[in-house]
Amino acid sequence: MDGPLLIIVAVVAVALIVGLLLWRRGSTRQVEDTRPMATPVRSALGATIRRALGSGLDEATWDDIESALLAADVGIESTTSVMTTVRRSHPDTTERARVAIRNALRDELVDADRALDLEGSPASIVVVGVNGTGKTTTIAKLAKRFMDSGTTVTLGAADTFRAAAGEQLGSWGDRIGAQVVRGQEGGDPASVAYDTLESARAKGIDVVIIDTAGRLHAKKNLMAELQKIYRVAGGDEVSEVLLVLDATAGQNGLAQVREFAKAVPISGIVLTKLDGTAKGGIVIAIERALGVPVKFVGVGEGPDDLVVFDPDTFVDSLVE
Ligand code: GDP
């Protein structure tokens, strides 16, 4: 075979393989998330660590790094644990010290399965969190993610307390092409959850995502309401209860997770607005304090700005 013919054959073969892969992707209904994981964080921590290590490896260096970890929202318990491990390892080069810090931070993150559990027909995801954290936007992003991989989704607007919440979810539904079940303003949120599941079952939909209210000032009522939604959505059968948390809320976010965790069994955290903070250490503080894995992070306001949380990429970008 001569040169030009060989090139043509190679191009055709590559086109066939790419076409086959694209066809397989479109024709398989995948509930699992298969996109590559990435969790970039523009942290100021790495630069501070580099600066501190640049001045030597003495007690003053460790003190500076300790302060930097605290300033990055890593939290007092994890900071103490990381610094104890690093000091004990007696690193003799700055690179070894950096690796020791990186590995100690990685060890603070829980060893949990971060993939969404999507058992159930339909699978049900209840999303909780304080108003303003980015709950509605996150639901839209998640729904888009599912729909992009051929998984059908119905959204339930069970925050009947705020008319605007239902409208907002409705307009996201229109934008991304997902059906939204809404209730009467001031109506029973649990009955919206029920209707959403019924509608999804009748239509053979794969996944239901239920939005809930987040008016933390009416804490007692809110928690009772969430418990009822959880029961109606299937109780133990609920596939995921995701708590949406604003990364810029820092240590306040920890108190929020604790409140919600008392009412419903949180199976994962979605940390929003990670693009809006140079800290990011809050991931470590949350996982250490509550043992609940961060499953996704929000990195912008658009429907595609949601990435799967990957612990290794995360700690690398934290200390780089
Ligand atoms: P909800 O009250 O919890 O439902 O919050 P919304 O979904 O209405 O979001 C509140 C604000 O946060 C909106 O302006 C969103 O565009 C914004 N937002 C949500 N997620 C992110 C994110 O990951 N990054 C940034 N920068 N903004 C976000």
Image: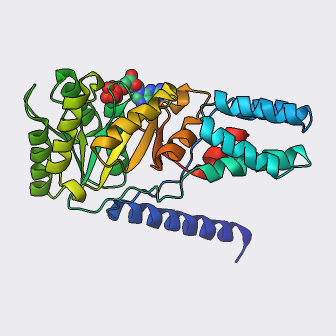
- On the image, the x and y values in percent for residue 133 come to 38, 28
Front residue of 79/284: it is 79
Query: Can residue 57 be seen from the camera position used here?
Result: yes
Displayed-image quarter of ligand 1: top left
- On the image, the x and y values in percent for residue 13 come to 56, 69
Q: Residue at (17%, 36%) from the top-left corner?
A: 225
The quadrant where residue 120 appears? bottom left
- On the image, the x and y values in percent for residue 200 come to 15, 52
> Where is 78 relative to 54, above or below?
below
78 vs 217, left or right, is right
Front residue of 102/174: it is 102
Front residue of 188/92: it is 92
7 vs 116, left or right, is right
Q: Residue at (67%, 45%) from the top-left corner?
A: 81
Query: Can residue 302 be seen from the camera position used here?
Result: no
Q: Residue at (65%, 45%) from the top-left corner?
A: 315
320 vs 304, left or right, is right
> Where is 134 relative to 87, above or below?
above
> Where is 34 relative to 230, above or below?
below
